[in-house]
Image (spheres, grey):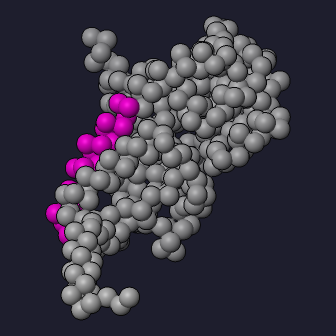
Amino acid sequence: MPYSKRNFQLLTLLFCVLFLCSPVQAKPKYLFKVATIAPEGSIWIKRFHNFVTEVGEKSNGEVGFKVYPGGIMGDDRAMFRKMRIGQLHGGGFTMTGIGTVVPDFRVMGIPFLFRSYEEVDHVMKGLWPSFHKAFAGKGLELIAMTEVGFVYSMSTSPVSTLSELKKSKVWAPVDDPISIAYLKTLGITPLPLTIPDVLTSLQTGMVETVFNSLYGSIVLQWFTKTKYISDIPFGYAYGGMLLDRKKFNRLPESYQSMIKETAKKHFSLLIIDTRKSNSDSKQVLQDNGVSMVIPDPGDVKALRSIRDETVQQVQGTAFSPQIYQTTMKLLDDYRNQTHK
């Protein structure tokens, strides 16, 4: 039976009310497409989503971010290539991945450099202006520093001595000349692989010893194969949140300042989250059958002494002498202040 004119008008009115009252997600005036290898559900992605939400609220929806997590857009090198052609406008990069663009950004990743997070914080604050300027010179805006944390050597069988490490098939990140040079100085020829390739390589036996933070080994599932962890930090791992500088500079200055302030807030909280997650992860790993192996004290001393030899080899290529001198002065100043 056909609708009456009145019924048609009522249906039309109901449709209009539902349409007007339904939330409509307007497209942001300024949209940044960003990627990262950090997996969905990790603290890094959760905190970034909080940052994105607050930026959207403060800009009344005019600034937005489309996030591609979990290596959907490839590793750091692939992400940067996509930024250069405009397919991406930013990303969360590791120190090794983006170190090919700004080599000086690698300097804090020297093995056995830091003894505490307090030292890390002091040096990171002091190096921020240099890092920001260096990235700006490459067309990138450094929005925030990110953290993986102190990393440990993790193996498929117990490794407590240097001789045992030399017998193992050791991984090193692609584009990490510092770690590669360090391991070669130890008499080890590492297998360079991208981070997404590590788990498969552990499963096939291609590599037997890898390096990661305690929390990182869980979220990347490496702990399912590396059941032994050397109970001493090998080094410190970090990264940066970077945006295309040209696109960032097209924003009104008020939005640029707002993004920087919001990033400072959320990424500072992220570092706190990361450190707590790393601390909590030790027990989680042990509950899942992972053993902490005490390294030989004499070999630990040797590992630390080889650091200086490695630095002499890679200065001028992996990073500049100037950034290394600045780093060591900041570190020495902090240590002198705290031991007065």
Side (left or right) of 72 relative to 197: left
Determine which quarter of the picture holds residue 291: top right
Q: Which residues are magenta?
A: 252-273
Residue 312 rendering spot, x and y as whole percentages: 59, 35
Above or below residue 296? Residue 246 is below
**Taking the image as drawn, is residue 217 in sight?**
yes
Above or below residue 244? Residue 11 is below
Q: How many numbered tags mark residues here? A: 0
Determine which quarter of the picture holds residue 297: top right
Side (left or right) of 135 relative to 287: left
Residue 109 rendering spot, x and y as whole percentages: 52, 36
Determine which quarter of the picture holds residue 123: top left
- Viewer-proximal residue among 28 and 212: 28
Residue drawn at 47 percent across, 20 percent down: 280
Q: Please, what is the dominant secondary structure of the magenta stretch? A: helix
Residue drawn at 36 percent across, 54 percent down: 142
- Viewer-proximal residue among 311 and 114: 114
